[in-house]
Amino acid sequence: MHRQGAIPELLIPASSLEVLKVAVRYGADAVYIGGEAFSLRAKAKNFSAQEMREGISYAHAHGVKVFVTVNILAHNEDLLEADDYLRLLGELKPDALLVADPGMFVRARKLCPDIPIHISTQANNVNYETFLFWHSLGAERVVCGRELSLKEISEIRAQIPDELEIEAFVHGAMCISYSGRCLLSNFLTGRDANHGACTHPCRWQYSVDEVSESDRMFTYTRLGEEPRFSIEEESRTGERMPVTETERGTFIFNSKDLCMIEHIPDMIEAGIDSLKIEGRMKNALYVATVARTYRIALDDLARGRNIYESHMDWYHEQIRDCTFRPFTTGFFYGKPGTDAQIYDSNTYERNYIYIGCVQGIKQIDTCQYIEIEQKNKFSVGDEIEVMRPDGENAVTVVDEILDENGTPVQSAPHPQKKLYLKLRTTADICDILRKQG
């Protein structure tokens, strides 16, 4: 139910059970996850049925909702298996199902009648008649297409009933294609983005050259217009693709990341009920960093606009403490211009290296040792930080590392090893360890 001017829900992605627990601890009001099938992030680790059951139980115990994505664009052969999956979700009882395909919507309404359905951005929701259409079928929430401006969202809010909620992305990667419905991965690699197997070719490195006159004549007859340039991906030498320019401009692939941390009041004024963070393939450091920053920003705003605005520099500083690309406001204030794209790099910027998430506490004699599954290399004597949900980053030193057998080691070069660390400060379960890098 929309409440005018209310602080919106903070909706955080989780790629695994560990990351779900981090999202809950670092400030999520709701978490969205994917199962091992029928989700548009098939390359994410995703959740087994047992992990989903445990994650839903953990979140509910902490007053946090869980939404499950069932947002593939299904083919005929998907439907019977989808029925089995939906029956399982009916037993697990998440707080909502996120659906894009009308056929999957029909199946979900039939097999999970008691679970609310939210309509994914993949359904191209860019006008109020579309919102009303889904509402007439029983949807309780619609996710805005990323092509919408805040002005357009305000107009939608004015035309739809209060009980229909609006969700919109507030932070994260932008897709090059209309509402994320991309064919580029399928064309280049045979992996279907609309079936959850996107290889993210929009982030690959391409070179651009002028098209020769002979090639220009060939592609002119094929495409009906004359291309001036062609592109070549670095690992596909000799496979040149024409780039044409229409009246809307030339389409360049690599978008900046969305960041609306300083524009939350405008999103509330537009009538948005849920602020969604993109990133179901991101690690716990990213999720903790972004969730904590937006949580504190929303809490500050609830206490007063002046408090929120006075902490803006801190929000921007914190949001850059995980992997990120340069930021943009996307379509919210009009069509993006040339400054919304990245032309010189396809890599993230990274100020911190993720070491691990605290999974347990072990007392040996009078000393506290924290258990982690190591993610990146570090050594005895390294200065690291313990990142806490309240906004504190406690600088400390690694005094000792024990392997899973309790044997002291000087360094930890190999990821995914269980380790026990003695630090010069305390840490709690789900605290994040990181070091500058």
Image (cartoon, rainbow, N blue to C red):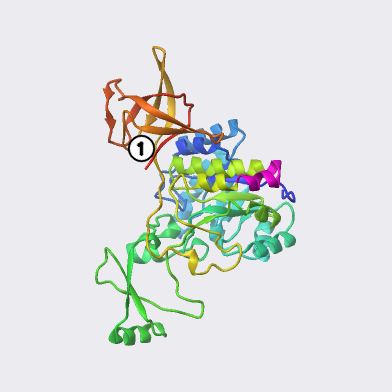
Point out residue 182 in the picture as x, y percentages from the top left corner. 45, 64
Corner quadrant of residue 336? bottom right
Point out residue 4 in the picture as x, y percentages from the top left corner. 75, 51
Image point (40%, 48%), residue name: 350
Does the magenta-highlighted stretch encompass residue 325? no
> Does 207 appear above or below 244?
above
Image point (45%, 45%), residue name: 322
Image quadrant in which the C terminus is located: top left
> Does 122 appear above or below 294?
below
In this rendering, the count of numbered labels is 1
Q: Secondary structure at mark 1?
A: loop
Image point (53%, 62%), residue name: 179
Q: Which residue is mark 1?
A: 375
Q: Is residue 334 left or right of residue 317?
A: right
Point out residue 240 in the picture as x, y percentages from the top left corner. 30, 73
Corner quadrant of residue 421? top left
In this view, the residue in front, 15 or 275, is 275
> Does 204 appear above or below 430?
below
Q: Is residue 389 left or right of residue 4?
A: left
Instruction: Characterize the magenta stretch by its predominant secondary structure.
Output: helix
Kindly identify the amino acid type of the residue bearing the numbered disc 1: Lys
User: In the orientation shown, which residue stands out farthest toward the top?
Assistant: 365
In this view, the residue in front, 224 or 79, is 224
The reply to whether residue 195 is visible in this rendering is yes
> Does 433 appear above or below 40?
above
The reply to whether residue 101 is visible in this rendering is no
In this view, the residue in front, 381 or 386, is 381
Q: Is residue 302 left or right of residue 248?
A: right
Image point (41%, 37%), residue name: 434
Point out residue 74 in the picture as x, y percentages from the top left corner. 48, 58
Does the magenta-highlighted stretch encompass residue 304? yes
In this picture, which residue range is highlighted in magenta? 302-311
